[in-house]
Image (cartoon, rainbow, N blue to C red):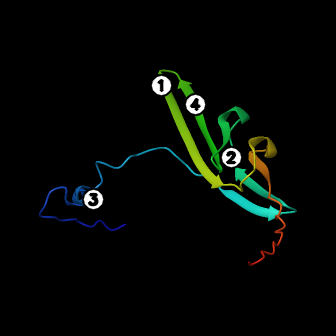
């Protein structure tokens, strides 16, 4: 293996790139994640599937308001390991939120949900096409 001598006239030159990033100190470092979603129209329904591995039913929330379907969830996990005098604790927190517009007239009671094997499935009825009745206006 070859050893290469690295020379720089400016001490800590490699760190300067961090400070050139305008929002380095102002950006938020959150632990959010976005699960994958599939949306299909099939047999007069909209089918939404979300991959939510590791979440329990109690961690998933669904709300319908003002023509929007909003899904959000969070997952907290703590892992402790003790070996003699050494103790290690790892904690994770993950959250997501996703909103979809839904057809007019769809009520929360019309949406059917199923959660199994880390996959959330929603069935949303598609609105039936209204028949437009032609009206003939008489001109006087």
The secondary structure type at the circle numbered 3 is: loop
Q: How packed is label 3: few (under 14 Cα within 10 Å), some, or many (20 or more)?
A: few
**N-terminal of the two: label 2 or label 4?**
2
Q: Is residue 128 above or below residue 34?
A: below
Residue 21 is labelled as 3
In the depicted view, which residue is nearer to us: 52 or 140? 140
Farthest residue in the left direction?
9
The secondary structure type at the circle numbered 1 is: strand
Residue 121 at x, y = what percent?
Answer: 78, 49
* Of marks 1 and 2, the one in the foreground: 2
In the depicted view, which residue is nearer to us: 38 or 91? 38
**Which residue position holds label 4?**
79
Report how far apart the C-alphas of labels 2 and 3 lie in the structure: 34 Å
**Which residue position holds label 2?**
52
**Which residue position holds label 1?**
86
**N-terminal of the two: label 4 or label 1?**
4
**N-terminal of the two: label 1 or label 2?**
2
Farthest residue in the right direction?
43
**N-terminal of the two: label 2 or label 3?**
3
Left or right: residue 139 compared with residue 98: right
Q: Is residue 84 above or below residue 36?
A: above
């Amino acid at each position: 293996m070859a050893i290469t001598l690295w020379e720089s006239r400016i001490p800590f030159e490699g760190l300067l790139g961090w400070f050139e990033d305008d929002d380095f100190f102002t950006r938020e470092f959150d632990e959010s994640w976005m699960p994958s979603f599939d949306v299909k129209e099939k047999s007069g329904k909209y089918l939404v599937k979300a991959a939510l591995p590791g979440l329990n039913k109690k961690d998933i929330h669904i709300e319908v308001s003002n023509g929007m379907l909003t899904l959000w969830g969070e997952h907290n996990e703590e892992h402790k390991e003790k070996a003699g005098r050494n103790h290690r604790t790892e904690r994770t927190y993950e959250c997501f939120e996703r909103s979809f517009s839904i057809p007019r007239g769809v009520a929360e009671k019309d949406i059917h949900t199923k959660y199994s094997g880390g996959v959330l499935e929603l069935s949303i009825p598609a609105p039936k096409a209204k028949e437009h009745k032609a009206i003939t206006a008489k001109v006087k």
